Amino acid sequence: MIWILDLLLLLFLVVCAIEVMRTRDLLSAVIIFSSYSLVMAIVWQQLNAPDIAITEAAVGAGITTMLFVAAISKTSRWEE
Amino acid sequence: MTEDIIVKTSARLMTPFIQMFGLYVIFHGHLTPGGGFQGGAIIGASMILLAVVYGLEEGEKRLGHDASTVLESSTLFYALIGLIGIAAGYSFLANRVAGIPVGTPGALFSGGAIFAINIVVGLKVASTGKTLFYALSREERP
Amino acid sequence: MRRKMIGLTLLLLVGYVLAGLVMEMPPVGSPDAPAYTRTIPRYLSRSVEDTGAMNIVASIILDYRAYDTLGEATVLFTAALAILAVTGGDEE
């Protein structure tokens, strides 16, 4: 029955990826991308790759998000 | 820099545990999933959390610019550990064959060069995460 | 025209040799590939004895492939250096 969880996580990933592409607000895109990374960490764990899961959670959801926010705070929040 | 008491208190309470977990991941890199890169990223994220909540100056007090300059150079120590292998007459970054004691598998002090390289890489990645964030978010000076 | 013909002949010859070499490689994901029949079992069975580390991933990235990890650390160092160079570093 674990495949239902996997299917939901993968659907969430696809929706997140499409929304990151569609949204015009860069700050929202960064937050959606952060949640994408968090769910991706769970997917890595489901694929029996705990090393990559830790990396994805720490780098993808933590450091990269803050670097993006710092970069946006220096430039414009809205996509041209 | 925020004035929100909830954010400040929770960040203050969470940071020691996050950093402790990061140190655990680094020091048990050869026994459990994780390693220098993962643990260093966790510690770097905790430093970024402190800097976001308490402001850049407070974070600068915890880990100053000079300290991160030294930590950034830990790639050099990595190469020095690799030179042990050459000094012993084997290839660059040789581990057991170069005579580095590897200990009993499963003990905390085992793995030989892997243990040392994990610590070096952890310090390096933590300092890099913090340095990148500070360099990107520093106020522009006239 | 003559030079073109020589060039084309050389190109076809080298291309034929290279394509033949690629044809000789085992197909992608084939269980008979040397990577699956020799490399992976070797690492799985000998890594604890070779390095003393229980975590096989750590023993691969920090012992067998430690040189690649050194390059990765260098990449991080270069990234920090480039960002500091672009944003001005510390002017005080």
Image: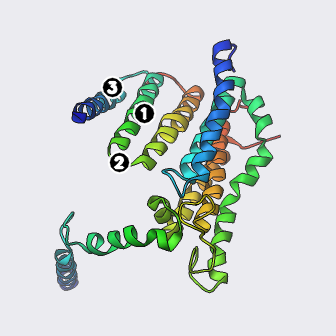
Check disc 2 and give the amino acid type.
Answer: Asn
Check disc 1 and give the amino acid type.
Answer: Leu
Which residue was labeled with disc 2? A48
* Disc 1, SS: helix
Instruction: Please state the chain letter of the residue tagged with numbered disc 1 in the rendered image.
Output: A
Which residue was labeled with disc 3? A19
Disc 3 to disc 2, C-alpha distance: 28 Å
* Disc 2, SS: loop
Q: Compare marks 1 and 3 and give the one earlier in the sequence.
A: 3
Query: Is B13 or B51 nearer to us in this picture?
Result: B13
Which residue was labeled with disc 1? A38
Disc 1 to disc 3, C-alpha distance: 16 Å
At label 2, counting other C-alpha atoms closer than 10 Å, the crowd grade (few under 14, some 14-19, many 20 or more) is: few
Query: Is B21 or C83 nearer to us in this picture?
Result: B21
- Residue sitting at the far right: C92
Quadrant housing residue C27: bottom left
Q: Are marks 1 and 3 on the same chain?
A: yes
Instruction: Please state the chain letter of the residue tagged with numbered disc 2 in the rendered image.
Output: A
* Disc 3, SS: helix
- Find residue C19 and report its horizontal and vertical position in percent: 18, 76
